Amino acid sequence: MYPEYLVAPMREDLTRVGFEELKDADAVKNAIESEGTVFVMVNSVCGCAAANARPAAKIAAANGKHPDKLVTVFAGMEKEAVDTARNYMLPYPPSSPAMALFKDGKLVHIIERYQIEGRPAQMIADNLIDAFEQYC
């Protein structure tokens, strides 16, 4: 676990643009299993989360067509919430950061860390926006 003062700005980077932070397994389950579309961002302290993933998530969330819910869990912090989110992302292996789109509780799109590292935020955002246009 990281000190809260360290991750607070990284949390706020998403919550200030409308992401709801989920901190326990029940909150994750309720969000993902809800009707409609849910975008889950597995946040992280790593550099690719700061330079690529969070900026991409914010760009995509600002798109005219976006999921009904924008939620986030933080890897290395709320273990139960993150583990629950990752279970919904199976068969994909655990990845931080990661981004997943669910529709009516079913995983319909995922972006793993290897698809985030070294890619510009706009390229990742365009991938997400395409998925939002298709499923939302």
Image (cartoon, helix red, strand yellow):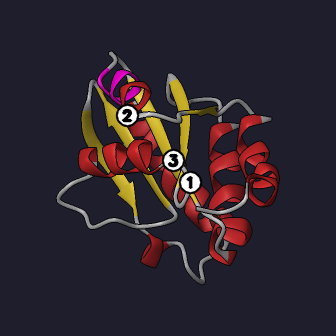
Q: Mark 2 sits on what residue?
A: 25
First-in-chain label (2 vs 3) = 2
Q: What element carries label 1?
A: loop
Q: In this view, does 32 lie to the left or right of 66?
A: left
Name the residue rendered at 43%, 31% in the picture: 38
Q: Quadrant of the N terminus?
A: bottom right
Q: Mark 1 sits on what residue?
A: 77
Callout 3 crowding tier (Cα within 10 Å): few <14, some 14–19, many ≥20? some
Furthest-bottom residue in this view? 118
Furthest-top residue in this view? 35
Q: In this view, does 132 lie to the left or right of 124?
A: left
First-in-chain label (2 vs 1) = 2
**Nearest to the observer: residue 1 or residue 53:** 1
Name the residue rendered at 72%, 47% in the picture: 11
Callout 1 crowding tier (Cα within 10 Å): few <14, some 14–19, many ≥20? some
Q: Does the magenta stretch include residue 17?
A: no
